[in-house]
Structures are given as C-alpha cells and as structure tokens.
Image (cartoon, grey):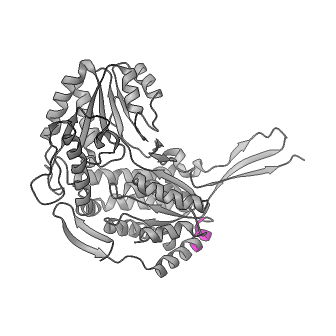
Amino acid sequence: MSDYQVVNPSTGEVEKEYPTATDAEVQDALARSHAAYGQWRTTDKSERTAVLHKVADLFDERIDDLAAIIAREMGKPLREGKGELQLVASIFRYYADEGPGLLADEPLSPSMGGNAVVRKEAVGALLGIMPWNYPYYQVARFAAPNLMIGNTILLKHAPQCPESALAIEQIFHDAGLPADAYINLFATNDQAADIIADPRVVGVSVTGSERAGAAVAEVAGRNLKKVVLELGGSDPFIVLDASDLGAAVKTAVRGRMGNAGQACNAAKRMIVVDDLYDDFVEQFTQRMSALQPGDPFEDGSGFGPLSSEGAAQTLVEQLEDAKAKGATVRTGGNRVDRPGSFVEATVLTDVTPDMRAYGEELFGPAAVVYRVADAAEAIELANASSFGLGGVVWSDDVEKAQQVADQLDTGMVWINSAQGTAADLPFGGTKRSGVGRELGPYGIDEFVNKKLIYTPQG
C-alpha cells in the first residue's frame, strides 16, 4: 500500500493511491534539480518574473478544479479553498512584482574606503516538506520567493495531498518553468532524510508539527544545512476591554474556526479579563454552538471534517482528557454521529495545567477560554506556552493593546483583528513555533547568499 493516498475525510473512503518514489527516482530527481540550478540561477530576472506571473494566472484560471481537489483530499469547504487559492495567486504576483527590487544590490559605506555592495544570489537546490492543512498556500510561500531568487525546488508534500501536489507541479510546467526547476516527489520520511543529507541540497523548509520540525532539524544540523521551520501554535486571543463585545466574540470565533480550526496561527486560547468573562463565554458558546459541520461541497456547511481519522481521534483524546480531569464543556466535545472525521465545535473552560488541552496544540474546532484579573495576568498566561507563533490583543485603547503586544513572546501580533496572512506581511514565530520567516521582504532573504563585493579606491 502506498503512503500517498486520497482518503476523503467526509466519508473515510480511499479514492485513489499513488506510488511512492523509488530510491532510484529520488536520486534521479536530485541530479536533475542540481543540474537545473545551473541554468535557472542565470536566467534573467525578467524571465523569472514572467513565469511567476503566469503561475498566478493559472491558479486563478483553475480555481474551481483546484478547490475541489482539496475538498476531497483534506475536507476544506469550497469557499475556503477558493479563498486559499486567491491568496496563492497574490503571493506569486507579489514576488513577481517586488522580487527584482528585493534582490537589488545593497550598497555599503566601508570605513576603510572604497566601494562595497551586498549582492543576493541563489544558493542551490532546496527541499520543501509541506503539510496538508493549506496544500497550495504553504507551497506558494516557500516556492514563490525561492524560484524568484533562482533556487530550484524538490517538494515533498503531505501523503494525503498527492492530487494537489501534482496539480501544483503541472501549473509550474504549464507556466514555462524549466521542468527540473520544480520537482514533486512522493518520498518517504527516510528518503527525505537522505535528500537533506545529500550535498546537492543546500537547505530545507518545513511546515508541520513540532515532531516533524525536530526530526528535520536534527538531520539538517548534522549536515550543516540551513533550515526554516514553521511549526505549531497555541495562539492567545486576549480581550482586555470592549465597548462592542459582540465584535470581539465574532472575531474570536472566525479566528478559531477557519479551516475547521486546523491552522497553526488560529486563535486557540481565549484569555478574557474578569469583568467581561461571563458575557464573553456566553456569547462565544452561542456562536460556536450554531456552527454545524457538513459536506465541504455544500454551501451551507459551517465547517468541514478534520483532515483525517487520525486527526479526529487525537483531538477527541485531548478533549476526553480534559473532561476526565474536571474541565467544563460549554458545548460540543464529541465526535459527530455520521461517517467521516467530523468533531463538534467545542468550548472548554476551567482548564488546568495538568490537562493536555492546557499545554498541547488543539488542532481542530475546539477552543479554551481562560479568566484573568488584568492585563498583567493575561500576558503571563499568554506567555506560559512552549509555542510563540502569533496572538491577538483586543482593546478600545489601541495604545494599551500595543503595549501588551510588545510583551508577548510571539512572532506576530494582531490588534483588534483576527490573525490573518498576506503576501507582503512576514509570517513566523519564536520558541517551539519555529525559526525563520516566510512572506514579505523577509521571506526572500532566507535562502540567499548575501555576497560582499568590495572594490578599493584608485
């Protein structure tokens, strides 16, 4: 049985299997990617820009078919899939438009006199290891800047996303990218480790779990390879005050429930000051209770299934642990009585440090609400996590919210807004949420050779 299968999470049925790469195929891909680097790195930036623009156009043109693929593969509702694809197109256009400027020489003023510039150059073939929760977006934010630089890419997608992986590769080919500048590989984890160790690969980017990131970083470290790691998150949504509490609640629900709660930067821990806590919990629970899971192909579905049976089982085990240890279930907390990997929208309160739900990432439609006395206690609780991806601070006093934001140990903070993402805004975290940045001007700086070129006077 192949590792790469389309298992429809709405039904649990295996719809198609794809053969795993052989060791010989992996070696062939490594050779081709390394050889293509010699050509692609010298291709004029205007040609790279044209390819990225065409890639963006093709994502737009194929949006319906591409959204249907991931509805089958990992259960994303069509409307959300189309939103993901619009973001993907914007990322390729951003790096097509801004890439040449972001890669321009940076002049220096040497104290010893003479002239000096820092020139950003490609470094070689890269391995990308991508997850299932945003099958197109995660690839775009890795591939777009690195193809603009002139690097080449080997892409190992999640085993449950083979159709979207092949669709992405086909778009690159149809856009005119040299065939071996981007190669999809249905590789195993052991083969991925061999690829990282191979001297023809110079770096690896991973989006995934802590376990996956640690395993990749270990191999990369032994082989002195650069890594970018975007891992888990347990992001706080801090409510300090709100003249319109309904707006805060609505935003919190939207921030928690996008992609059925399967987003690393989703708002997972609601931290609410004492005088707003009871009203917040009541309104938040009402809104969460109103969301009903359904078929991702149906317009009226509040949210889709979890990506797999394993994902559903893990979330339910975390919820059962919280129940057994005294947490209060305000709504949900159970599997949905229907085929597929559906779990009810869930709200927990009275969660304590001895529960898995306190320290672990809840990757699904479940939120925890905490009561705090003031901003200082909110900051302490928010930072009492091994993760540090992002967070939200809600307050009518924007200056106060910004002061709290300054004290959060996270890579991103959004004020009076659900966490989001955009092509021109950097994405990444601290602590066990990973290292490095993607998107924006910082995303093009991770896998480049910043070469100093010095010329003396005279």
Which of the pair 215/137 is nearer the observer? Answer: 215
The residue at the point 36 percent across, 25 percent down is 378
The residue at the point 34 percent across, 22 percent down is 395
Q: Which SS does the magenta portion mostly show? A: helix
| Tag count | 0
Which of the pair 29/389 is nearer the observer? Answer: 389
Residue range highlighted in magenta: 35-41
Which of the pair 3/30 is nearer the observer? Answer: 3
Residue 326 image-quadrant placement: top left
Where is 397 relative to 105, above or below? above
Relative image position of residue 147 (x, y in whole percent)? 52, 60
Whether residue 325 is visible, yes or no, is yes
Relative image position of residue 237 (x, y in whole percent)? 33, 32
Where is 331 relative to 364, above or below? above
Which of the pair 378/416 is nearer the observer? Answer: 378
Outermost residue toward the right in this view: 458
Is 124 placed left or right of 119 in the picture?
Answer: left
Relative image position of residue 197 (x, y in whole percent)? 56, 67
Where is 370 relative to 51, above or below? above
Residue 68 image-quadrant placement: bottom left
The residue at the point 49 percent across, 73 percent down is 179
Is 163 placed left or right of 426 in the picture?
Answer: left
